[in-house]
Amino acid sequence: MRLRPRSLYPGNANLPIGGGTEAQIANREIGAPRVRQPTPELKLKLGRYPRAIMSKVAASTADCAATDTSMKFFKSKRVWKSVLACTTIAAVSSCSRGSISPETALATFSSDRILAHIRKLSSDEFEGRGPGSNGEQLTINYLEDQFRSAGLEPGNPDGTYLQSVPLVGITPDNKMKLTLSAHGRTLEPKFQDEFVAWSKRVTETSSIDADMIFVGYGVQAPEFHWDDFKGVDVKGKVLVVLINDPPVPDPSDSAKLDPKVFGGNSMTYYGRWTYKFEKAARMGAAGCVIIHQTDRAGYPWEVVRNSWSGIQFDLAAPDKNMGRLAVESWITSDFATELFHAAGQDLDKLIHAAAQRDFKPIPLGIHAKLTIHNTLRTLDSHNVIAKLTGSDPDLRDSFVIYTAHWDHFGIGPEVNGDRIYHGAVDNASGTAALLEMARAYKALPKPPRRSVLFLSVTAEEQGLLGSKFYAEHPLYPLARTAVDINMDGMNVLGRTRDIVQIGRGASTLDDIVDAAAQQQGRVVKSDPEPEKGLYYRSDHFEFAKNGVPAFDPEAGLEFIGKPDGWGLDQRRIFTAARYHKPADVVQPDWDLSGAVEDCQLFFLVGYRIANGTQMPAWRSGSEFKAVRDASLQDAGIPH
């Protein structure tokens, strides 16, 4: 879940669900179950609607009567309002165009089932769902069984539910010793407490023995006329860099960041830790050390420590990753201050200087030595994929994909007596939502026009590896993939008046999301913490950077019955206390009614795209538009 240090941009089609371009869907027969009635207050309101519309609502209610929890949720005023809005639009459309709404599928979402899935997947039995572990086997078996029992087809064209993902596991020796020599003084930071280091090179030993040089943010961005290297040769050096983008002040208001440079408050890809290491390798450096700052990274040191202290996975590559850095590393901000002091430098002053275009690299006069001894293993991990074939012969070979990563960190460093990283919110909750989504689509009287894929990917926590592998080895053409809808960490705290769309403004998805939210009486908001670069930190990003428009939703922040600011406070508490820690377990005060409502919104977004003749498109100025245009052109698809 979004560890990879999540930017982006503002919406086209305010057409309702059930428009004339959607496939006609036969009404599902209503069986014998007793239909629970709305409250007297709601009956008065419902009386305003035509009988034809109310018969559809009654059909949805009958479907929901099967589970008490679903029914209680369905009876709430907000949900009746949402279903009525959807049903009213669809009924009017069907009178003129013969189309029907998906309210029967919307009614199937169950908070009881979602919670049961989360409890199972985050239990001790599943051992933290680490790739290549017994927990993986239990997880993929569970997902296969759930997809099969829901009646979904195997998603791999080979007739199985699995896509093998070849990984290499690299476990560094935790007794490694980093020695930093400067001006007759030697510093030896403590592994895990003050630094972490690893190598993605598939070799038993990897070493650095080189001078260190501070290169600011380590960025070359010609579109912003920014170059932190200024022609300095850094081959064979160890680069020391700051996390995030250079915070360039707005010329008209120094208290704000310039929105024309590095996205202002929004992190761009230049701010990601992945970019820092990739750039250092391209520059020929021996190693790269990132200075951790909690506010700039978006997560505390414990997340860094727990994520990079144990086994590291990567995709198996023919060159054994020898093009990667010999050593990749993070150090704490406190140790960085000590390091720069030993070099005769003031770190705070250099951080300020690094935010200026005229910054030049500064040799630190410090020599770094480190040898990492690795234990290597190769393994096949797995993406799990199910499919619902579309009903339109002309569109069934195009696709809507829902994604959620099933993996977490397995068994790792002990924290408060627990070594199992359960990952209940991250991302047993998203995986549970994926299973419910598949069940809901299968409950449709007739499939949508496009085919729908349900893809549960591996090794997200290791750098989006499962989604990266799928994007590089797609089972279905990416040019014919209309959208990826990613679910990474569901709302477990109750219903909200809003939904957050990370990366809002980048594509025509905005209008579709807005329409779905309006049907629920909700509003769509942009990322409240754009400085964290959340758009780059989950599996949808691998689809986006390969051109596929991607919807990256997050829980809303305006919780019903809670004071202003409560939602953002809860998000920050989770990040500090439970994110990527064993403490991410099911809590007794969870309220999954919000997860159900969000699932329904995600369903409506995908359902509309699956029935529309036009695929969503990136807007002019999006960093992903050129890739998409080329992909569509190569496939002969008009755009």
Image (cartoon, rainbow, N blue to C red):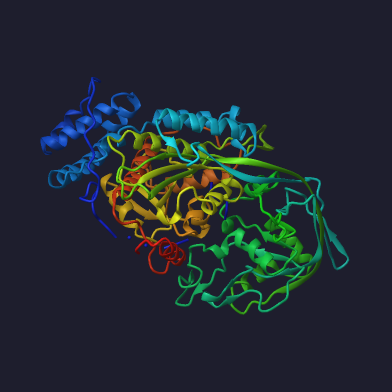
From the viewer's perspective, is residue 177 above or below residue 180?
Answer: above
What residue do we see at 33% from left, 48% from top?
610
Q: Which of 553 and 303 lies nearest the eye of the viewer? A: 553
What residue do we see at 11% from left, 38% from top?
50
- The image shows residue 480 at horizontal and vertical percentages of 40, 54
From the viewer's perspective, is residue 555 above or below residue 510?
Answer: above
Q: Quadrant of residue 178?
A: bottom right
The mark total stands at: 0
Q: Which of 345 and 438 lies nearest the eye of the viewer? A: 438
> In the visual, does 226 lie left or right of 27?
right
- The image shows residue 514 at horizontal and vertical percentages of 31, 53
Could one spot residue 165 in this view of the protein?
A: yes
Q: Kindly give the residue lying farthest to the right in the view shown.
A: 184
> In the visual, does 615 lie left or right of 519?
right
What residue do we see at 33% from left, 60% from top?
11
Q: Which of 4 and 580 lies nearest the eye of the viewer? A: 4
Q: Quadrant of residue 187?
A: bottom right
**Quadrant in which the C terminus appears:** bottom left
> In the visual, does 65 lie left or right of 365?
left
From the viewer's perspective, is residue 123 above or below residue 304?
Answer: above
- The image shows residue 355 at horizontal and vertical percentages of 59, 72
Q: Which of 328 and 584 lies nearest the eye of the viewer? A: 328
Could one spot residue 589 in this view of the protein?
A: no
- The image shows residue 54 at horizontal and vertical percentages of 16, 34
Q: Quadrant of residue 340?
A: bottom right
